[in-house]
Image: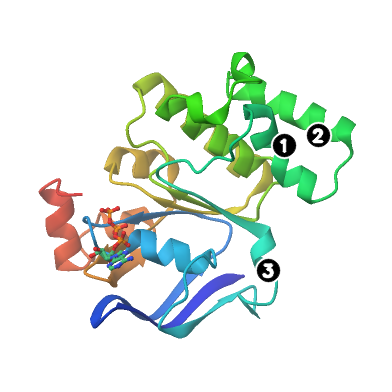
Amino acid sequence: MKLTITSLIKKYQNRTVLNIPELELEEGYVWGIIGPNGSGKSTLMKIIAGLLEPSSGKIHYRDQKLKDGVQKDMTLVFQKPYLLRTSVFNNIAYPLQIRGYSEKEIRERVHELLESFQIEALRDQKAWTLSGGEGQKVALARALIFKPRLLMLDEPTANIDPSSIMLLEERIQEYYQQEKPTILMVTHNIQQTRRLCNRVAFMNEGEVLDSGDLRHLYGAEAHPLVRAFIQKGLI
Ligand SMILES: Nc1ncnc2c1ncn2[C@@H]1O[C@H](COP(=O)(O)OP(=O)(O)OP(=O)(O)O)[C@@H](O)[C@H]1O
């Protein structure tokens, strides 16, 4: 099973910010999407999540066009957590509420997530009063609660303290081990890529220069620009 991208172009005014003739992302892996600022990583994730229209091109997920309702199976967690103007509990419960789960199931599942993210104390706090790191935990808990088959994370641990980074990474790893979803994760942290990802795609100026397993990307066969970036620690 694959996520297949064909002839994808995204332009703003006349500037092309994304140009991907062909890219296949095999399912069941944790993909690190890496590359310098402005290379199109977030734009690609938003297009896959259906939040942004491409200028042209096609994306197929499990042999279906993205349009055909398959996006209910996926979610994108933004770099700056986007939370609803309500309590932490309601934010995490929301994906189950709209999917018609019973009150009891919702209470139990939310409680489990509050515990595993160590945010029980924030249960009734209003989402807009949370710190950045707390908000990021709530956003990830809300994403995991409905067990998406495709989980997209845009710099999930940017501006997060080291112990919270560890906690978020543990939750992502645990979810991957339990459910074997496909995870696409934008990160600027190479160490994090090594810890969490088993596949990597490298982007530069709107193009995917290289992709594959970690050994390939960090090895001698990788695209010369990818090697230069990695060797100089530029990403
Ligand atoms: N709404 C917009 N209008 C015009 N240009 C845009 C818009 N959104 C993004 N861009 C441009 O598209 C390019 C790709 O942006 P994108 O956010 O996808 O990059 P990125 O790789 O995620 O960067 P970063 O690592 O800094 O988060 C950038 O040059 C950006 O300025």
**Residue 201 in view, yes or no:** no
Closer mark to the observer between disc 3 and disc 2: 2
Q: Residue at x 36, y 45 (%)?
A: 193
> Which amino acid type is marked by label 2?
Ile
- The residue at the far front in this view is 85
Instruction: Judge whether 144 appears above or below 149 on screen.
Output: above
- Of the two numbered discs 3 and 1 on the same chain, state the one appearing first in sequence: 3
Residue at label 1?
A: 93
Quadrant in which residue 117 is drawn: top right
SS class of the residue under badge 3? helix
- The residue at the far top in this view is 121
- In the image, 226 versus 60, the foreground residue is 60
> x and y percent of residue 123 in the render?
65, 20
Residue at label 2?
A: 106
> x and y percent of residue 68 in the render?
69, 77
Mark pair 3, 1: CA separation: 21 Å
Residue at label 3?
A: 70
**Residue 79 in view, yes or no:** yes
- Of the two numbered discs 2 and 1 on the same chain, state the one appearing first in sequence: 1
- In the image, 13 versus 161, the foreground residue is 13
Quadrant in which residue 125 is drawn: top right
Quadrant of the picture in which ligand 1 is shown? bottom left
Mark pair 2, 1: CA separation: 6 Å
Give the crowd class for mark 1: few <14, some 14-19, many >=20 residues within 10 Å. many
The answer to whether marks 2 and 1 mark residues whose Cβ atoms lie closer than 8 Å is: yes
